């Protein structure tokens, strides 16, 4: 909620409290017969926002700030229920939802303390999932982790979990199945396509060369050399 969207609160008497139809855990609070704001039921109970209660504007401002923090937290939990996210991603999504930098920072800090956000574990799990489920190579994985705002040391630790033999097995399975028919018709042409395809998926030159060495060969090309596929620069 931006400063412009925040309601102007005044001291007065709570004259009505009603449950929202679309938000079963939220209540509308009326002060002096006029709608003032809505609040989560936990905060309504905590601060005794009951009909007939006299409230000061300063107190209401504090309650509204707590409610905003609670909404951001619940929004973040809902985002995490669909998939894990990095701290950088979570900050971006909360900002997109309109939360202030202060609320966003405090929400991310709370999630990290409670173990819902952990960039080191996130990096390791994403690396494993991208390699084994999506058959992406280490260069692709490293770039994606960088884009997600993961720290350099966490990326390096995650990349240590990318086993070279597993990476080769995934690359070989992917290439041989995708280009099986072309390998039978024209192995030389197919091998060129496979080399480019694997590099685009982030496989390092050493793995590409190893895959090509296992595929059918025909023609005057000679052996494939690792130097044809130079490694990307390290951090």
Image (cartoon, grey):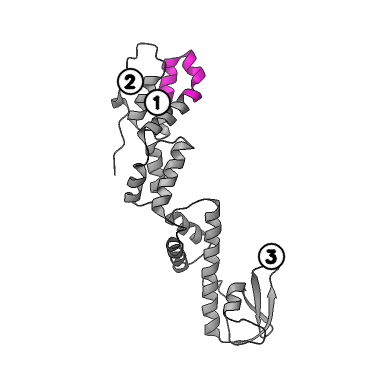
Q: Examine the image and state in which quarter residue 167 appears.
A: top left
Whether residue 148 is situated above or below residue 200 in the rendered picture: below
Earlier in the chain: of badge 2 and badge 3, it is: 3
Left or right, 24 with respect to 121, comes to right
Tag on residue 195?
Answer: 1
| Residue 149 visible to an observer of this rendering | no
Marks 1 and 2, the one that precedes in the sequence: 1
Residue under pointer 2: 224
**SS assignment at label 2:** loop
Tag 2 near tag 3, CB within 8 Å? no
| Image quadrant occupied by the C terminus | top left
The 10 Å Cα crowd at callout 1, few under 14, some 14 to 19, many 20 or more, is: many
Residue 199 at x, y = what percent?
39, 31
- Mark identifier at residue 143: none
Q: Any mark on residue 22, and which?
A: 3
| Distance of label 2 from label 3 (alpha carbons) | 64 Å
Give the residue drawn at x 42%, y 29%.
169
* Vertical arrangement, residue 81 with respect to residue 217, above or below: below
The reply, left or right, for residue 20 in relation to residue 142 is right
Secondary structure category for the residue under label 3: loop
Rounded to the nearest angstrom, the CA distance separating label 3 from label 1 is 55 Å
Residue at 43% over, 26% down: 172
Residue 18 screen position, x and y as percent: 69, 76
Mark 3 neighbour class, 10 Å CA radius: few under 14, some 14 to 19, many 20 or more: few
Q: Earlier in the sequence, mark 3 or mark 1?
A: 3
The residue sitting at 38% across, 11% down in the picture is 219
Per the rendered image, the range of residues in magenta is 176-197
Residue sitting nearer the eye, 167 or 147: 167
């Amino acid at each position: 909620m931006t400063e412009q969207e925040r309601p102007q609160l005044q001291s007065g008497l709570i004259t009505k409290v009603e449950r929202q139809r679309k938000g079963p855990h939220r209540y509308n609070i009326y002060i002096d017969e006029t709608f003032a704001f809505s609040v989560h039921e936990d905060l309504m109970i905590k601060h005794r926002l009951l009909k007939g209660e006299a409230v000061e504007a300063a107190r209401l401002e504090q309650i509204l700030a707590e409610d905003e923090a609670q909404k951001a937290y619940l929004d973040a939990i809902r985002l995490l229920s669909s998939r894990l996210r990095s701290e950088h991603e979570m900050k971006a999504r909360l900002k997109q939802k309109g939360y202030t930098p202060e609320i966003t920072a405090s929400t991310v800090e709370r999630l990290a303390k409670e173990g819902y956000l952990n960039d080191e574990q996130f990096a390791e799990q994403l690396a494993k999932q991208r390699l084994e489920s999506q058959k992406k190579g280490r260069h692709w994985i490293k770039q994606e982790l960088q884009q997600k705002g993961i720290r350099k040391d966490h990326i390096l630790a995650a990349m240590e979990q990318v086993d070279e033999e597993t990476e080769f097995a995934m690359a070989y399975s992917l290439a041989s199945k995708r280009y099986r028919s072309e390998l039978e018709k024209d192995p030389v042409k197919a091998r060129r396509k496979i080399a480019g395809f694997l590099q685009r998926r982030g496989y390092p030159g050493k793995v590409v060369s190893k895959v090509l060495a296992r595929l059918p060969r025909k023609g005057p090309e000679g052996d494939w050399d690792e130097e044809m596929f130079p490694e990307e620069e390290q951090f």
